[in-house]
Amino acid sequence: MPFSLSDMSLSERTVDRSLEQQRARYEREVETLVSASLRVMRSGGYAAATVAGVLEEAGLSTRAFYRHFHSKEELFLAVFERDSADSSQRMQKRLDALPDPSARLVGWIEEVLSLGFDRRRARRTRTFASEAAILRSLHPAEFAAIQRALYEPLLAILEAGKADGSFPHTRPEEDARSIHAVCWALVEARLSGAGPADAEAARAHALRFSLPALGASTGSESNAEG
Protein backbone atom coordinates (compact mmCIF):
# COMPACT_ATOMS: atom_id res chain seq x y z
CA MET A 1 0.00 0.00 0.00
CA PRO A 2 1.24 3.55 -0.73
CA PHE A 3 2.67 5.52 2.15
CA SER A 4 0.82 8.62 3.36
CA LEU A 5 1.24 11.22 6.07
CA SER A 6 -1.54 9.52 7.99
CA ASP A 7 0.81 6.56 8.49
CA MET A 8 3.13 8.79 10.52
CA SER A 9 2.68 9.49 14.20
CA LEU A 10 2.26 13.05 15.45
CA SER A 11 5.81 12.89 16.85
CA GLU A 12 7.22 11.83 13.49
CA ARG A 13 5.38 14.61 11.67
CA THR A 14 6.63 17.12 14.23
CA VAL A 15 10.23 15.95 13.74
CA ASP A 16 9.89 16.16 9.95
CA ARG A 17 8.49 19.69 10.17
CA SER A 18 11.32 20.75 12.48
CA LEU A 19 13.92 19.29 10.13
CA GLU A 20 12.40 21.10 7.16
CA GLN A 21 12.49 24.39 9.05
CA GLN A 22 16.09 23.77 10.09
CA ARG A 23 17.09 22.94 6.52
CA ALA A 24 15.47 26.13 5.23
CA ARG A 25 17.36 28.15 7.86
CA TYR A 26 20.64 26.51 6.99
CA GLU A 27 20.09 27.12 3.27
CA ARG A 28 19.51 30.82 4.02
CA GLU A 29 22.70 30.92 6.07
CA VAL A 30 24.75 29.37 3.27
CA GLU A 31 23.28 31.76 0.71
CA THR A 32 24.02 34.71 3.00
CA LEU A 33 27.63 33.58 3.48
CA VAL A 34 28.19 33.00 -0.23
CA SER A 35 26.74 36.40 -1.17
CA ALA A 36 28.75 38.16 1.54
CA SER A 37 31.94 36.41 0.40
CA LEU A 38 31.47 37.63 -3.14
CA ARG A 39 31.00 41.22 -1.96
CA VAL A 40 34.11 41.04 0.24
CA MET A 41 36.18 39.56 -2.57
CA ARG A 42 35.03 42.23 -5.00
CA SER A 43 36.07 45.02 -2.69
CA GLY A 44 39.40 43.68 -1.48
CA GLY A 45 40.32 40.58 -3.47
CA TYR A 46 40.78 37.02 -2.32
CA ALA A 47 43.99 37.55 -0.35
CA ALA A 48 42.41 40.28 1.77
CA ALA A 49 39.20 38.34 2.39
CA THR A 50 38.99 36.71 5.81
CA VAL A 51 36.39 34.62 7.56
CA ALA A 52 35.96 37.44 10.09
CA GLY A 53 35.37 39.94 7.30
CA VAL A 54 32.84 37.69 5.60
CA LEU A 55 30.99 37.11 8.88
CA GLU A 56 30.88 40.83 9.58
CA GLU A 57 29.49 41.45 6.10
CA ALA A 58 26.97 38.62 6.49
CA GLY A 59 25.94 39.52 10.04
CA LEU A 60 26.46 35.91 11.15
CA SER A 61 28.46 34.22 13.89
CA THR A 62 31.58 32.07 13.73
CA ARG A 63 29.40 29.17 14.82
CA ALA A 64 27.18 29.69 11.78
CA PHE A 65 30.23 29.63 9.50
CA TYR A 66 31.68 26.38 10.84
CA ARG A 67 28.26 24.77 10.78
CA HIS A 68 28.58 24.74 6.98
CA PHE A 69 32.26 25.15 6.01
CA HIS A 70 35.57 23.84 7.30
CA SER A 71 37.74 26.62 5.90
CA LYS A 72 37.85 29.88 4.01
CA GLU A 73 38.86 27.98 0.88
CA GLU A 74 35.83 25.69 1.10
CA LEU A 75 33.55 28.72 1.36
CA PHE A 76 35.15 30.39 -1.66
CA LEU A 77 34.85 27.15 -3.60
CA ALA A 78 31.10 27.39 -2.98
CA VAL A 79 31.18 30.99 -4.24
CA PHE A 80 33.06 29.91 -7.35
CA GLU A 81 30.63 27.03 -7.87
CA ARG A 82 27.58 29.28 -7.69
CA ASP A 83 29.03 31.83 -10.07
CA SER A 84 29.99 29.08 -12.51
CA ALA A 85 26.47 27.63 -12.33
CA ASP A 86 24.98 31.04 -13.09
CA SER A 87 27.27 31.41 -16.11
CA SER A 88 26.44 27.89 -17.33
CA GLN A 89 22.69 28.54 -17.09
CA ARG A 90 23.03 31.78 -18.99
CA MET A 91 25.09 30.06 -21.67
CA GLN A 92 22.73 27.11 -22.05
CA LYS A 93 19.73 29.40 -22.40
CA ARG A 94 21.46 31.24 -25.22
CA LEU A 95 22.64 28.06 -26.95
CA ASP A 96 19.18 26.49 -26.81
CA ALA A 97 17.81 29.43 -28.82
CA LEU A 98 20.31 28.99 -31.67
CA PRO A 99 19.36 26.94 -34.74
CA ASP A 100 22.31 24.63 -35.46
CA PRO A 101 25.75 23.47 -34.30
CA SER A 102 27.59 26.17 -36.29
CA ALA A 103 25.59 28.96 -34.67
CA ARG A 104 25.90 27.35 -31.24
CA LEU A 105 29.69 27.08 -31.62
CA VAL A 106 29.89 30.82 -32.25
CA GLY A 107 27.52 31.44 -29.33
CA TRP A 108 29.65 29.31 -27.01
CA ILE A 109 32.82 31.14 -28.04
CA GLU A 110 31.18 34.53 -27.53
CA GLU A 111 29.90 33.56 -24.09
CA VAL A 112 33.32 32.38 -22.93
CA LEU A 113 35.05 35.43 -24.35
CA SER A 114 32.58 37.70 -22.54
CA LEU A 115 34.15 36.52 -19.28
CA GLY A 116 37.13 38.66 -20.21
CA PHE A 117 35.78 41.22 -22.66
CA ASP A 118 32.48 42.24 -21.05
CA ARG A 119 33.41 44.81 -18.40
CA ARG A 120 30.97 43.62 -15.73
CA ARG A 121 31.71 39.93 -16.21
CA ALA A 122 35.46 40.56 -16.48
CA ARG A 123 35.42 42.08 -13.03
CA ARG A 124 33.96 38.88 -11.62
CA THR A 125 36.37 36.72 -13.62
CA ARG A 126 39.33 38.71 -12.35
CA THR A 127 38.10 38.27 -8.78
CA PHE A 128 37.96 34.50 -9.12
CA ALA A 129 41.17 34.17 -11.12
CA SER A 130 43.22 35.20 -8.10
CA GLU A 131 42.19 32.16 -6.06
CA ALA A 132 41.67 29.60 -8.82
CA ALA A 133 45.11 28.01 -8.38
CA ILE A 134 44.62 27.67 -4.62
CA LEU A 135 41.19 26.10 -4.97
CA ARG A 136 42.42 23.75 -7.70
CA SER A 137 45.20 22.46 -5.45
CA LEU A 138 43.01 22.03 -2.35
CA HIS A 139 39.86 20.71 -4.00
CA PRO A 140 40.91 19.20 -7.35
CA ALA A 141 37.82 17.03 -7.92
CA GLU A 142 35.33 19.77 -7.10
CA PHE A 143 37.24 22.33 -9.15
CA ALA A 144 37.38 19.97 -12.12
CA ALA A 145 33.61 19.47 -11.91
CA ILE A 146 33.06 23.24 -11.98
CA GLN A 147 35.26 23.61 -15.05
CA ARG A 148 33.52 20.68 -16.72
CA ALA A 149 30.21 22.58 -16.59
CA LEU A 150 31.67 25.18 -18.96
CA TYR A 151 33.25 22.56 -21.21
CA GLU A 152 30.32 20.14 -21.60
CA PRO A 153 28.08 22.39 -23.77
CA LEU A 154 30.94 22.72 -26.26
CA LEU A 155 31.39 18.96 -26.35
CA ALA A 156 27.67 18.55 -27.05
CA ILE A 157 27.88 21.11 -29.87
CA LEU A 158 30.76 19.28 -31.54
CA GLU A 159 29.05 15.90 -31.21
CA ALA A 160 25.90 17.34 -32.81
CA GLY A 161 28.00 18.89 -35.57
CA LYS A 162 29.67 15.57 -36.24
CA ALA A 163 26.28 13.85 -36.43
CA ASP A 164 24.70 16.33 -38.88
CA GLY A 165 27.84 16.92 -40.97
CA SER A 166 28.44 20.53 -39.87
CA PHE A 167 31.84 19.54 -38.43
CA PRO A 168 32.88 16.45 -40.43
CA HIS A 169 36.49 16.39 -39.21
CA THR A 170 35.85 16.91 -35.52
CA ARG A 171 37.13 14.68 -32.78
CA PRO A 172 34.76 16.07 -30.14
CA GLU A 173 36.73 15.36 -26.96
CA GLU A 174 40.08 16.54 -28.31
CA ASP A 175 38.66 19.54 -30.17
CA ALA A 176 36.54 20.67 -27.24
CA ARG A 177 39.64 20.79 -25.04
CA SER A 178 41.60 22.68 -27.69
CA ILE A 179 38.90 25.25 -28.44
CA HIS A 180 38.33 25.78 -24.72
CA ALA A 181 42.07 26.34 -24.26
CA VAL A 182 42.24 28.87 -27.11
CA CYS A 183 39.26 30.84 -25.80
CA TRP A 184 40.41 30.80 -22.21
CA ALA A 185 43.89 31.97 -23.26
CA LEU A 186 42.22 34.94 -24.96
CA VAL A 187 40.27 35.70 -21.77
CA GLU A 188 43.42 35.55 -19.65
CA ALA A 189 45.29 37.74 -22.11
CA ARG A 190 42.51 40.31 -21.95
CA LEU A 191 42.51 40.33 -18.16
CA SER A 192 46.26 40.93 -18.16
CA GLY A 193 45.96 43.81 -20.65
CA ALA A 194 47.34 41.91 -23.64
CA GLY A 195 45.83 40.03 -26.57
CA PRO A 196 43.16 41.22 -29.04
CA ALA A 197 41.88 44.75 -28.65
CA ASP A 198 38.19 43.85 -28.51
CA ALA A 199 35.74 40.97 -28.37
CA GLU A 200 35.18 40.95 -32.12
CA ALA A 201 38.89 40.48 -32.82
CA ALA A 202 39.08 37.73 -30.19
CA ARG A 203 36.06 35.99 -31.69
CA ALA A 204 37.60 36.10 -35.17
CA HIS A 205 40.86 34.69 -33.81
CA ALA A 206 39.12 31.79 -32.06
CA LEU A 207 37.06 30.93 -35.13
CA ARG A 208 40.09 31.14 -37.42
CA PHE A 209 41.63 28.29 -35.44
CA SER A 210 38.47 26.34 -34.75
CA LEU A 211 36.53 26.16 -38.01
CA PRO A 212 39.24 24.68 -40.29
CA ALA A 213 40.11 22.02 -37.71
CA LEU A 214 36.47 20.97 -37.53
CA GLY A 215 36.10 20.82 -41.30
CA ALA A 216 33.39 23.48 -41.19
CA SER A 217 32.42 25.24 -44.41
CA THR A 218 33.91 28.70 -44.91
CA GLY A 219 30.43 30.18 -44.64
CA SER A 220 29.83 28.85 -41.11
CA GLU A 221 30.90 32.06 -39.40
CA SER A 222 28.83 34.34 -41.62
CA ASN A 223 25.83 32.02 -41.34
CA ALA A 224 26.10 32.10 -37.57
CA GLU A 225 26.17 35.87 -37.61
CA GLY A 226 23.00 36.00 -39.64
Image (cartoon, helix red, strand yellow):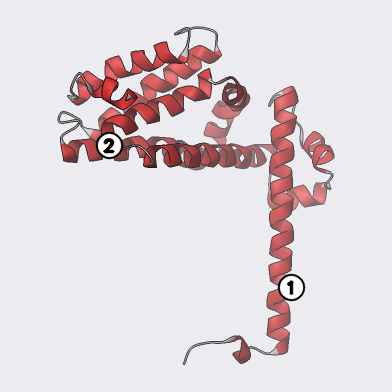
Picture coordinates of residue 80 (x, y %)? 58, 36
Asked which quadrant contains residue 39, the reply is top right
Q: Where is 93 relative to 175, above or below? A: below
Picture coordinates of residue 17 (x, y %)? 71, 75
- Residue 71 shows in this picture: no
> SS at mark 1?
helix
What's the residue at 69%, 82% (across, down)? 13
Quadrant containing the C terminus in the rendered view? top left
- Checking the image for residue 100, the label placed there is 2
Front residue of 218 and 171: 218
Q: Which residue is mark 1?
A: 18
- Checking the image for residue 63, the label placed there is none
What whole-number distance in Å separates the C-alpha atoms at marks 2 and 1?
49 Å
Count of numbered labels shown in the rendering: 2
What's the residue at 45%, 28% (across, down)? 111
What's the residue at 22%, 36% (across, down)? 161
Q: Indicate the amino acid at tag 1.
A: Ser
Front residue of 152 and 222: 222
Q: Indicate the amino acid at tag 2.
A: Asp
